[in-house]
């Protein structure tokens, strides 16, 4: 893995940054010169990743906070800015998901995923805004390709991610004048993540590899490289987009001929 000074001198907060895709993003930031704070509901998910961030030569802060709790979010952001001195980048990655057909899903089950994914993204973005305003910055909302599809068993997550995509576009307009760009990343199935382990069975995995124009699942590096790009000055005029990182897989859902 290469390292650069792409984000040197900057500080990032990655929610859900202890594990999976968001751990990969946190480590990529650290390898490119950025100090990184990570949050999760469980501190035990954070400490090993914080050690890995430090091993890259960056400063790390690990704070337990549930993104559903605005008071805990405010406290965590105050602590992060207190320790790192600034906040330039926010990645809203904290998410929850499971497979359940809508007819079997309780109102609380639907609401829990909307609360974590969509309301959590709002809560953290709102709390981060005063700090991002200080120098301008970048927000990345982790979405999914679910909003474009009719994936059965994912009514809760698809609705939450569709809301996130809308929030990305609105905040891009509201916060652009402060020098804050707001973009999203929509990964397809990513190898080696809890999401694929829990949500994708072997047959679906093989189907995804077969249908993907690039003939494979994504990797955590695929997503962290796209995130690095969107947070860097190389993307200085990109605002309000959700970048799909799925090798073209979701486009193949339109297939009629030639399967
Ligand atoms: N199928 C149907 N409903 C489910 C469910 C499942 N697999 N898992 C949770 N729910 C429902 C619960 O039944 C409950 O609704 P109820 O009160 O009407 O019974 C509601 O969701 C809240 O569940 P609870 O376990 O109390 O919430 P939580 O905040 O502790 O858990 C989740 C959050 C729901 C996201 C849980 O799945 C979780 O912790 N997952 C692990 C992390 C994760 O999802 N990572 C992302 C992988 S892509």
Image (cartoon, helix red, strand yellow):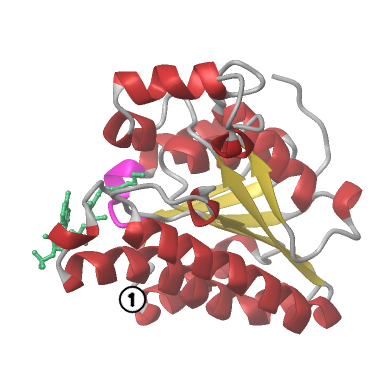
Q: Residues within 10 Å of mark 1 (few under 14, many from 20)?
A: some
Image location (x, y in percent) of residue 140? 64, 58
In-front residue for pair 151/221: 151
Q: Is residue 237 magenta?
A: no
- Image quadrant holding the C terminus, namely top right
In this picture, residue 241 sits left or right of residue 206: right
The residue under the point 66% across, 82% down is: 130
In this picture, residue 187 sits left or right of residue 227: left
Q: Which residues are magenta?
A: 40-45
| Image vertical order of residue 179 relative to residue 31, above or below | below
In this picture, residue 171 sits left or right of residue 27: right
| Image vertical order of residue 18 relative to residue 65, above or below | above
In-front residue for pair 69/258: 258
The residue under the point 45% across, 69% down is: 118
- Ligand 1, what quadrant? bottom left
The residue under the point 34% across, 72% down is: 68
The residue under the point 33% across, 52% down is: 154
| Image vertical order of residue 255 relative to residue 187, above or below | above
In-front residue for pair 8/160: 160
Q: Is residue 42 magenta?
A: yes
| Image vertical order of residue 238 relative to residue 206, above or below | below
In-front residue for pair 199/211: 211
Image location (x, y in percent) of residue 38? 48, 52
Question: Would you say residue 57 is visible in this rendering?
Answer: no
């Amino acid at each position: 893995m290469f390292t650069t000074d792409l984000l040197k001198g900057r500080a990032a907060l990655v929610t859900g940054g202890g594990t999976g895709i968001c751990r990969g993003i946190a480590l990529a930031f650290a390898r490119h010169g950025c100090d990184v704070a990570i949050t999760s509901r469980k501190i035990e998910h954070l400490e090993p990743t914080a050690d890995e961030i430090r091993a890259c030569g960056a400063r790390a802060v690990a704070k337990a906070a549930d993104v559903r709790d605005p008071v805990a979010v405010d406290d965590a952001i105050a602590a992060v800015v207190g320790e790192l001195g600034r906040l330039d980048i926010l990645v809203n990655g904290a998410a929850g998901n499971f497979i359940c057909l809508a007819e079997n899903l309780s109102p609380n089950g639907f609401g829990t995923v909307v609360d974590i994914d969509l309301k959590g993204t709002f809560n953290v973005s709102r709390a981060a805004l005063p700090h991002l305003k200080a120098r301008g910055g970048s927000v990345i909302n982790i979405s999914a390709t679910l909003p474009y599809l009719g994936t059965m068993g994912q009514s809760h997550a698809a609705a939450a991610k569709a809301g996130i995509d809308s929030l990305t576009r609105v905040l891009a307009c509201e916060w652009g004048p402060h020098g804050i760009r707001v973009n999203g990343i929509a990964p397809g199935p990513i190898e080696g993540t809890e999401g694929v382990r829990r949500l994708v069975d072997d047959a679906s995995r093989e189907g995804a590899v077969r249908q993907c124009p690039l003939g494979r699942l994504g990797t955590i590096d695929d997503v962290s490289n796209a995130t690095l790009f969107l947070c860097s000055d190389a993307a200085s005029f990109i605002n309000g987009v959700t970048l799909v990182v799925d090798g073209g897989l979701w486009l193949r859902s339109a297939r009629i001929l030639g399967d």
